Each structure stands twice: as structure tokens, then as C-alpha cells.
Amino acid sequence: MKNKKIIIGGVAVAAFAIAALSFFMRERKVEQPLNDIEVSDLVEVEEIVYKYGIPVDRYNVMYGIVEPNQHLSYILSRLGLSGTEIHNLTEKCEGVFDVRRIRSGQAYAFFTRKDSLSTPRFFVYEESPKSYVVFDLRDEYKVTRGENPSEWRQKEVKGSVQSSLWVAMQDCNTSPQLAVDLSHIFGWTIDFFGIQKNDEFRVIYEQEYVDGQSLQNFHILAASFRASDSTYYAIPFVQDGEELYYNTNGNSLEGAFLKAPLDYYRISSRFTNSRYHPVLKRYRAHHGVDYAAPTGTPVYAIGSGKVIAKGYQANGGGNYVKIRHNSVYTTTYMHLSRFAKGLQVGSAVKQKEVIGYVGSTGLSTGPHLDFRVYENGKPINPLTIKSQPKKPISPANREQFQIVCDSLVGRLKAL
């Protein structure tokens, strides 16, 4: 929540002073041209503090938190609004805000007149630290959206992996969410489920702040990751109106297929022709990779394609989705807790589009994703799938890219 101060002075104050003095002279029938009136700039300045675009000094403000199972009508009725007033207000929400999206744990503010604690004027619901919804309860009700001003602060971090990248970020006093952002950028190049102890990362990034509070929003300005004997770089560059990350050779880090179909969690079982099945209590082939993750974790399509199967296998994969990406590759995602809304057989999906959520349906002992890749109909190890990169830096942009690249690589090495 950002406070804004507006100073009323200059021309506005001068005009007010002239009007007041003119009225005073008219009352006393003093004839004096306006040009002869001296207006001093040393007029006391009025300061107005705004929050959510509302002058808070003019109202009594009560703050609260949405409790579990509370909805808008319940909150407003407790604040004194009648059923008719609540109905009229919710009608104004159409096309602006879905009142069913009010979530527990979010903050709200209630404004009343200073001369009457029971006369409501505004109700404000904070959707997030940045955005809010203002319910104007004066005269004809109306509902509008607002956004708190934010700033981006540049930061740097360097560290090494001892147990996991997530923990390494915490050890560097940096948000673990940055590890997820890194895995998104290097997701076509580095297998983040197979990183080793002492692998090193260096990142120059921006983080968004609102009213001095940090948000989990990042923009990576440059990054490097040393895995084993190789160092990988991520250099952002805008080409054809799109910002992508490139390696030092000018090749895009984004490929036709992601290295993994979900964000940074752990591999619990790898591709093998002989694995002991925890439910069946016997050895059999496991032609996929199991990713252990909490129930509800979003699962992505590793590449663009078309849904060719969606269903349920009680004694097998549970809820599953199968996608054909091209004439060569098909992928399958199993044990899902549920499917993405609107996903049907025949649906076209894009790379990184959510197709379902991790679960433990079918023959499963715990929440995980069983991910499988087929090449020309035969199962292959998902961790070895090849991916062609997107369009590289064009010859026309090569010189400018090289300048940017050399500068950022130099900064990363100097950390």
C-alpha cells in the first residue's frame, strides 16, 4: 500500500486567494482592479494523504483480514450494509471483479464518514500487494480496480549448491522463487533434477517492491550456471519484439521441448527396464521418470502439440493425458489429481501450458508425476530427449548482441 502526497499550491492556491479577496472587496464595495492585488506565494500548503486513491484523512478507516469461508456479502453485512445494498453493489461488480474470487488471508479496508461511524463510503479488497478493488458505496455504487505503484531494485547473488538449488538460494538470503525462475530459463539446457554438489550459480536480477515490501516478482538480467565442467550463460536480448535468453554463441536457450514438465522438485524414480514396484511388490520395467511433488503442483506440456488421449486407468496411470507433438514424439503425464480446466481430446496446447496437476490417482503410493516420452512409438528416457533451439540471433543483430553479451558476462565473472 503506497501513500501519495499531493501538494495544493501555486496557481490553485493563488486563484483561491484572489477569489476570496475579490468576494471580500465586493461585500465592502471596494473598487480595485485584480491587477493591483498582491498575491503572496507564502501561502500555507495543504497536505492530503491518499491510500487506494482515497483521501484517508477525511474518513475513519478500519482494516481487516478475510477469514476462512467468508464471502463478500458476509463481510459487508457485518460492516452494516443491508441485503439490498449488498445486492446493488454486487451487480456493479459484473465485468470488473468476480466476488467469488475473494480469498481468505487477504486484507481489506472499510471507510466511514468521520461524523458518522455507521455511514459507509468505501470498501477496498486487496487482491495482491500490487492490485486492489475499490467498492465505492457513495450515491450510485461503482466498482473499480487500482494498482499500487511499484519499483524494481537491482540485485546480485552468487552461490553454490550443497543439497539443492532451492536451499542454496535460502542460504544466500535470496528468495527460493529465484531458483524456479532460473529453472525456467535454463529449462531446455540444464537438467535441474540432476544438479550436483558444488555446482555454482551467479545471477544479476531485478526484484519488484511495493511500499518497501519485496514481491516474488523477478526479472533476470543475466545468469550463469556451472554444472560439472561446463558453464552455461543466459543473456537476455530483444529480437523481433520478443525478449529471449541466449547463450554466448547467440543461440536461444528455448527449445522445442522442456527438460522437465513441472517446476523444481525431485526425481524419485528414473527410466529403467527393471524397477521394484512399491504396490505390486515385484520388478518390472519403468519406462518413464517419476517426479515427486506435492499434490496440486501444476504440470506443463513440455512442447506444443495436440491432446490425443485423456482418461483414467484404475490399475495403472490414474488420471492421464497424452500429447502428440509431431510425427516423431508423443508424451504421457500420469497420476494427475485433476485436469486443467477445459482440456479435452483434440485440444491444442502450447509449450509450458498447464495440462493438469500432480496427484496420486491409479496405482500409486504417494503424490508424484509419472512422465513418459515416446519416439516413433517406442519409449525413450525423457532425460535424454533432444530439443532444437528457437531462432538464433540474426546477422543484423549480431554486433549489438555481442556488445551486450560481453558486458554481462564480464559483470557475472566479477561477482
Image (tube, grey):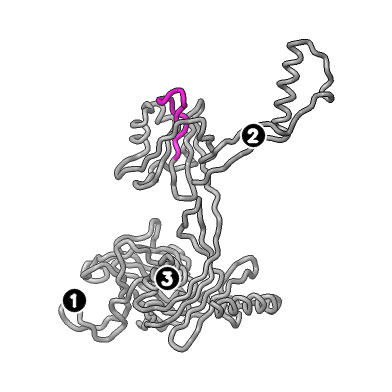
Q: Whole-percent x and y of residue 218?
A: 50, 63
In the image, farthest residue toward the bottom: 229
For the question of whether residue 412 can be seen, the reply is: yes
Q: Marks 3 and 2, how far apart in space?
A: 47 Å
> Which region of the structure is painted magenta?
112-124
| In this view, the mark in front (1 or 2) | 2
Which quadrant would residue 17 be assigned to in this image?
top right
Residue type at the position of mark 2: Val
Which quadrant would residue 167 be assigned to in this image?
bottom left
Q: Whole-percent x and y of residue 322?
A: 37, 70
Which quadrant would residue 258 be assigned to in this image?
bottom left
- Pointer 1 residue: 278
- Pointer 3 residue: 172
Which element is circle 1 on? Answer: loop
| Up-down relation of residue 142 to residue 227 (above or below) | above
| Up-down relation of residue 370 to residue 19 (above or below) | below
In the image, farthest residue toward the left: 281
Residue at image location 59% in from the left, 68% down from the top: 243
- Pointer 2 residue: 45
Q: Marks 1 and 2, how far apart in space?
A: 75 Å
- Label 3 vs 2, first from the N-terminus: 2
Residue at image location 32% in from the left, 73% down from the top: 291
Residue type at the position of mark 1: Pro
Residue type at the position of mark 3: Cys
